Amino acid sequence: MRPLVFVALLGFAFADPTVYFKEEFDDGWQDRWVESKHKSDLGKFKRSAGKFYGDVEKDAGLQTSEDARFYGISARFDKFSNEGKTLVIQFTVKHEQNIDCGGGYVKLFPSSLDQKDMHGETPYNIMFGPDICGPGTKKVHVIFNYKGKNLLVKKDIRCKDDVFTHLYTLIVKPDNTYEVKIDNEKVESGELEADWDFLPPKKIPDPDAKKPEDWDDNEKIDDPNDTKPEDWDKPEHIPDPEAKKPEDWDDDMDGEWEPAMIDNPEYKGEWKPKQIDNPAYKGKWVHPEIDNPEYKEDPNLYSYEDFGAIGLDLWQVKSGTIFDNFLITDDVAFAEQFGKDTWGKTKDAEKEMKDKQDEEERKQREEEDKKRKDEEDANKKDDEDEEAEEEDDEADEAESDTKVPPKTEL
């Protein structure tokens, strides 16, 4: 029986992962995705690998194509619940336009989503991914909807802000812990209850507790034996002793003359007694806490009864972002390997292509700069030659004017 048990255990340990959704945007992607019609001027998506890539087909994803637009598009999958299971949300984002302000995140919706009316206020379960706007906002959003409220993560998770493709992964576990990975490397983790305001605090200040009236929490006090020196009080400003009344000063016309005021070198400022340790100091009073009667533990913070759609609901000032390699699964190892097999296999070639383009652009700029400089130098020489020729002509004319005309015989 032991071998059977061993085989059974092996079968359990290496059970096939559950893949709820996977999208790599082949030619049939338009049959699986529905554009929102909530607004008539929503931006259009197109399938593209962008201007630089590792593989033109493998890196082709969904790209925003119009500047300063809202975008809305979604895809359905079979309804599922993550109760008792790990949930992994993963995708790649490439801001090849060097984005200045715009979203790069996804939303997971319940199966009740009206895809053609999806918009910014449509209720969702989870929102995850990068968001960039100026130098102040470069974060990874992780937002959970809990009892109708969207809860933002309290930690600052920084996103990538270059022009290359990056892999974003959110892992939510049944023990109410989470992990965020970028490029298959952990960048943040913790407990859901600690890092989001799902629940009220476990402890609150005791409303019946008050600081005793005789409680002295002043660590230092004035020295009662310290007295102000008799010569302490001096004016802050005094008349300038070197100032002299102008000789042409007329008291009747100019009024009574007064010398200018200067800082008094003997001024010592406001006198304060020196500080000494307070013998009655009892320390800082700490308000006692009690159990919060409104707190109730929830072991299912991580759990949602209904996932049924994934969508891109975005605003972008400068378009060009490419989304690709979507995956929703219950297997962390499978997601990591999927990331290696997609993003991992083309990322180096993508950078090589971009570096080559940058080098070609640099050489072209240098050639254009050199050509422009040569033209400027040539024009300058032509101007100098023309000036010299004009000066020679003027000199010849001047010499001709100074010659004595020949005498004529009478």
Image: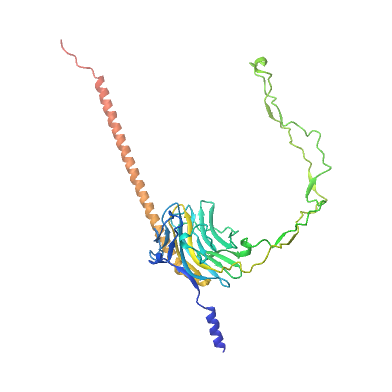
Q: Nearer the viewer, residue 240 or 351?
A: 351
Query: Does residue 167 appear to the left or right of 382 in the view shown?
Result: right
Query: For the view shown, which residue lies furthest in the top direction?
Result: 410
Q: Is 58 on the left-hand or right-hand side of 239?
A: left
Residue 54 is situated, as x and y percent measured from the top left of the image, at: 40, 63
Q: Quadrant of the N terminus?
A: bottom right
Residue 187 x %, y %: 55, 63
Q: Is residue 232 above or below residue 205?
A: above
Between 215 and 379, which is closer to the camera in this rendering? 215
Task: Name the image quarter holding residue 378.
Answer: top left
**Image vertical order of residue 89 relative to residue 159, above or below:** below
Q: Is residue 388 visible?
A: yes
Q: Nearer the viewer, residue 251 or 363?
A: 251
Name the spot of residue 167 as percent of width and height, x first.
Answer: 49, 64
User: Residue 401: which quarter of the image?
Assistant: top left
Q: Residue at x 27, y 31 (%)?
A: 389
> Residue 357 lies in what quarter of the image?
bottom left
Residue 165 visible in the displayed image: no
* Outermost residue to the left: 410
List the single residue furthest toward the bottom. Answer: 1
- Number of callouts: 0
